[in-house]
Every structure is written in structure tokens, then in C-alpha cells.
Amino acid sequence: MINSTDQNHIVIVEAYEGFVEFLSDEPEERNCLQGLGLPVDEIAERLNSRITILCWDKWYDYEQNETWVSTPATRPLLQPDFGNRSVLFQSGRVKRIPIPARDPVYWLPFDEKGFSPRSYGLISDSGLLFFASYCLNREIQVFYRDDPFQAIIFSMWGGLGYVSQMSKTIQVPDMVDVPFIVLITDTSVNRQRANQEGIWTRHAIIRRQMEDVSLALADQVLVFGPRGKEIAFAGRLPESPPPVCAPRRIEVSLIDKISRASEQFSDIHSPLQYFLYEPQQAASGVLTALEALNLLVNKGVRIDRQVISAGPPMTFAPMKPREFVDYWSSRGFVRELERKHLWKWEREYPRFDYIYPVRLYLSSFDHLPNVWAELARGSFVLLSPAAAEGLAPGEMLPQEVLIQGDPVPEKVADHMEKILKTDIQELDKIRRVLCKRVVEAHRGVRRQRLIEDTTEVLHRLLQSSPKPQDLSRISLMFFDRRVPLRTLALQNIPPPLPTLKPKTKEGTLSVVVTCYEMGTMISEAVKSVWDSERKPDEVLLIDDGSQGSETLTEIRKLESYAAEDGLPLKVIRQQNRGLASARNAGLDAANGEFISFLDGDDIIEPEFYRIALRVLERYPRLGGVAAWALIFGNEIPDGFWNAPQPELPFLFIENSIIVPCMTRTELLRDIGGYDVRQRYNYEDWELGIRMLVSGWPIVTIPMHLTKYRVRRDSLYRSMTDVQNQVMRELLLNTHRETVSKFAVEIAMQLENQWKKLVYTRITSPVSIHSQYQYRGISFRKLLFQTTKRLFILLFVNRKNTKLL
């Protein structure tokens, strides 16, 4: 035990594995999911610490009806039973409690008042797990206040730590400032690829961003084996602390059963039979097994007994709502396998009498699989790297049971053929060797060493706060989401830092408010700037040629009010030249080191300038800081813009940077300010793309810190189809080289948007289908009227020629 005068407190947040993230209905495997598979009792005793495990059990009852979204995904055909879990933890220092199922706005249970519009917006825009991360951030703030803890552990899979980790890094109010540890089991993209769900859909992009940012921001990373180490190596900065390999929790009684199985000889005269027991989906290896079997049959390999694929029925994402089994049973080669009694579908775990069972673990994705239970039953196993993770740490597994690399059908067929041709007596010898190595791994010195390494690193984190990860370096991932962070960081040659003008005072802030016939709204905007917690040193009001008496009167009132109360305000009047020109006039006149823009009909929340300024001062390599927005107006329901982090290539599909984005004044001047050719709010969009292309990442604060007003008579809302077409073509032509670089990914995202409009689906009761209706972007207009020309741009006109 590590000596400690005070008992520390650690929180572990389990992965969300409900209806939308269903993993297994095997009791043994579901028990493995508790406590993220860590040996929690041992850790608590060695550290003399309390450990609280936060689980999502109360959320699962509401999930299917209340938070279902139309994103194509693999789901169970029937609602799983998530109740009656065994109590696994014996230490009095460990407790497992549910995360309250309550709305973060109403602060009432879901079944009492339902979901708030903001909650529906988060779910519809960004997915259920993004909403869960948002809710979790507030719940752990409350939990920390009531029962302080010194460290918190999340799973990378699902990205549930994303909002809390971003909040801590950006230092938002009420954030929980403790070490964040991320445990790697697998990534969602592996599951999505295997299940043919598509990885360039909006929800998939956001999920991947959540997981990758969570991994990169972690103060420490834990893994269970080589696969986790590879993910950590690729997804973190080169200067980050190396991952620590932890042992998985396995019950002593189960080790005893495996030990007995290692001494027991199977009936060598029994025929061999392959089987799977997994959710019937491609990620579990079912499709791989089908294709491997077909390869063997076509090769003429003799197979005496049919392969059984059993497990919970699932939908098949590409053919939703068709069931996976139903769809593949309709395929010719599968019908032929079934007709020849070489393949059989079942629901329940198969019963074997006088059979030598070989269970296939061919998963491309796995989160804490329980292969141990199958070994305890005396089965032979064939394992993918995902399934073998943490099975016997430090031990060399027999090559006959482990597939090297991705479990593609050709490799699986080769292994299955070798097993079929191997004498049962020899196979049983290999099985017993595997069992012995598993027992040695979990009873021997190696496991003790892993426990010691894990508790030692946790002890260090509990004793002193680690140096935070560099957010500006982590944000390099947003330059190209196809490339791992480590690669981008090693290749990065940062642009030179902007040089301040001689008379510019460090740390000063200029705010530019643009106005054209805003009436009383301009007063609301300017007063919200004055009411900020961090008041600007300079407020520049650019009147872009207003002629209306109401607007001119309001500006004069503001000038008078500022003079009386000593508030910063300088009015610059010019002939009407458009929004980009007005902003550039403010940029030319600004004297602050930092600058932020605000449209004259919008409102800034009091915290934004203080938080954004602190982030930019701490991370000088960041190009800008933005935030989420509340959407309001007289003619629309309230909405919410929950923008993901601005990244390429997604930024070519959707403008995820909302004004006011704070940046450095000289940086903006260096890259040319706003493009006066861009109109209808494409000014902001193009500038955001240009900043990323120029090597300056932008981060978004996961808080609603601005209010974006939607008006019927705004330029953006009144934009015609032709104007939108012209602006989109101009935007893409301006960045033709970068667009060509991401041509395939842009096309895939547009295809997804197109299909969502052509094949409409039922969505949540208060769908924000989207946010685009609140921001004035009509994707129906955009996709149906511009796709032809866009594809010409992407695939034909790669040189600087005009569009036909």
C-alpha cells in the first residue's frame, strides 16, 4: 500500500453502452464493462483511496424513445435488458452509483418534464453521446462540489470526457480542475468502418473529434495492450507522457476455472465446430466469418460441421431498417452456404454435445471482451487483435490462436483452414498452453508489475497537478483530420508570430461592432459589450452608411452615454460598402493586441471576452477562439448552435465558426483581413478556412457565450438561390488547392447531406434538422442546385479554369 495520510478520492466514468452503443448481452461480458475493466478493488486498496464509479444505468430506460436520432447506425432489433447486474466490487472503498437522468436545463428527471429544446438541439446536431458528455460535465461539477475528488478516469471510446476536458483546458467557470486520465479500449471509427455506417457523416465526424480531443488532452493515458499503445502513440503529441499499461480485472474464481481447464483434456475424437456468439453485426466479425467460409468452400476445403453464428439480432446500417441476418440471408452466396448446411443462424448461445468447439473472435472493434469465460468452458479460440487486448498481458500467445493484423477474410480463412487440418489432440494442447499463459499472466509477477506501474502513476497524479497539454499544439489535428496528431505535430512548421505595432499595449482588446440600419438593436449589442466581465479597451462602432433616423438616433445616444460614463466608444462612419469592408475599416483602426467582431444585431455574453482572451494569451499559437451560440429572433423558436471544433475538411461543408471569434489584430492584418468579395456571411466562413489553411487553428469554447439574432430582412436570410450559388462557387474557387486535396471527403459529406434530404426520416420531436434553418443556410437549395457544379470543381476543373 502506498502511504498516504489522507484518503484520496478517484472517480471512474463508465463508457456509455446502451441501446445506441450495444456491446453484448452475455452476463460475463457485461460484468467486464463495470469500472472500465480496471482492477478497481486492488487500486483502491493500494492507493488507500476511495473510488466512485459513475454509471449510465438510469439513462438506458429513456434512450430508445426519447433520444433516438436518424443517423444510420447498427442497433439491436429489440431493446436490451440492462438490469440486474452483479455486484462485483468487494472493497468497502469502492461504490458504483448511477449518473442522474435529468435535463441539464430544467434540472429535473427526464420523465418529469422531458427534454429541453437545448437538449434536443444537442442530440439532433451532435448525437446522443455528445449530449451525454455535456450533461456529464455539469453532473461532475455538482459531484465535485458535494464530494471532492482528486482525479477522474474516462474511456476514450465515446469521448465522454470531451466537454469536461475542454472546459478545464479553457478554464471556464465552475470547471473541475483535477487530472484527467483516459483509458483506451478502442475507437468508434473502427466500429463505424466495420459496420459500413460511413465515417464522414456529421455525427461520425463529431464523435471522432470528441474521442481524439479527449485522448490528446488527457494528463495520462492507460492501455490494456499493444493495440491501445498504437492508438495512444498516433493520437497524442510526441512530448506527451507515454501510456501506462494496466491489468484488466478478472475474478479469482474465473482464473481458477481457466487453471482447471488448462489441466483437462478434451475428447479428441469429437468433431470440430466453429461458432460465434456476438451481436449480429459486421464489427463483431460475423460478415468476415461468412466471407472467410465462402473462400474456404470455393477453395474446396472440406468442412464437416456448419458454422454457427449466434447472438442478439441487429439492424444493418446500410440497409436500415433491415435486420443484419435477414439481409445477408437474402444474398446468393449465403443462401448457398445455408442450403449446404455450412452456415446456420441462431439466437441463443449454442449447446455442444460431443463437439470440439472453436469460438471465433473476429471483431474489428472491441470494448473489454471477455474471452476468459470461453476459455474456462474449455473452448478453443481464434482471436483478432481487438479481442486479444488485455487477455494475457506480457505473455506470448500461441500463433495458432492469434490473427496478426486486421482480421480480413483472407487471413481468417487461412487460420480456419490450418485449424481444420490440425489434429484435435494438437489443438487441445495449444488450448491448454493458452490457458496456462493466461493464468500465469494474471497470477504472476507481470501482473503485480502492471498494478504497481498503474498505482504509481495514479499516485503521482493525486499528489501534484501535471503540466497541462498544449492546446495550440493539439489543435494541429484540425488542419487535416485524415492524419494522426503525432504526424501533424512532427511535420508542423508554425508560421511566424505576428509582431505588435510599436504603440500597441500588450493584452489590450478592441471590439468592432458593425452596423447598417440596426435601429434599437445596435444599442443592445454595444451595451452587451460594455457589460462584459472583461471590458474592452476599445469599442469601434462602424456605421456602414445607415440613413434611417432610428439607427442614427440610437448611435448618438450611445455616444452620449459613453461620454457621460467614461465608456470606450469610437464611431467610424463610411458610405455603405458591405459587411466585409466595414469590418476591415474596424481592423484598420484597431489599436488593441486582440480583436473581436460583433454584428450590430447580436449580443455577447458577459464571460466571453474574459475566457477567450485568457486562452489566447496562454496559447499564442492559436489563431482564434470562438464559442457556441444561442439563436433567437421574433419569428423563430429559440435555437442553439453547438458547433464542433473547426476542422478540415468539415469546414468546407459547414461554417462552424461563429462571430464573435477573438483573434490577434496583427495576425488578421497579416493574412489580409476580410475578403470584400464575400457576402451574405460567407465573409466569416472564408476567413475561418483561410486561417486554418495559413496554419492558425481555432478552438471553440463548449459554452453558449453569444446570442445570434435571426431576422427576416438580414442579408443572409434574404439571400437568393443564385446568390448562394455564386458565393459557394467563389468560396471553393478561392481555396481550390485545398478543396482538391480533400475532394473525396467533401464529396462523401455532401452525399450524406443529399441523402438526408432525399430520404427523409423521422427525427426527434424538436429536431434542429437542422441548425441550418436557424442560420439561413438552405442545404436543400444548396445540394440540389449546386452539386453538379461542385463535382465539376472537385473532379474535373482542378486547374485555375473557370467553371462551365
Image (cartoon, grey):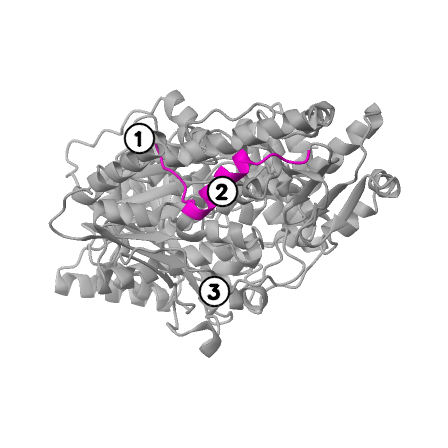
* Cα distance between the residues tagged 2 and 1: 20 Å
Amino acid, disc 2: Arg
Mark toward the viewer: 3 or 1: 3
Seen in the picture, residue 46 relative to 62 is either above or below; the reply is above
Q: Quadrant of the C terminus?
A: top right
Q: Tell me which label, 2 or 3, sits earlier in the chain.
A: 3
> Which x, y percent locates residue 382?
62, 33
Q: Tell me which label, 2 or 1, sits earlier in the chain.
A: 2
Residue 714 visible in the picture: no
Mark toward the viewer: 2 or 3: 3
How many neighbours does mark 1 have within 10 angstroms: few (below 14), some (14-19), or many (20 or more)? Answer: some
* Cα distance between the residues tagged 3 and 1: 34 Å
> Which x, y percent locates residue 323?
73, 53
Q: Secondary structure at mark 3?
A: helix
Q: Nearer the viewer, residue 723 or 349?
A: 349
Residue 765 visible in the picture: yes
105 with respect to 375 (left or right): left
Q: How many marks?
A: 3
**Which span is picked out in magenta?**
242-267
Q: Secondary structure at mark 1?
A: loop
Seen in the picture, residue 33 relative to 728 is either above or below; the reply is below
344 with respect to 396 (left or right): right
* Cα distance between the residues tagged 2 and 3: 22 Å
Residue 11 sits inside the magenta stretch: no
The disc label shown at residue 208, or none: 2
Tags 3 and 1 in contact by the CB under 8 Å rule? no
Residue at x 51% of width, y 69% of height? 636
Tags 2 and 3 in contact by the CB under 8 Å rule? no
Kindly identify which residue carries mark 1: 240
Kindly identify which residue carries mark 3: 59
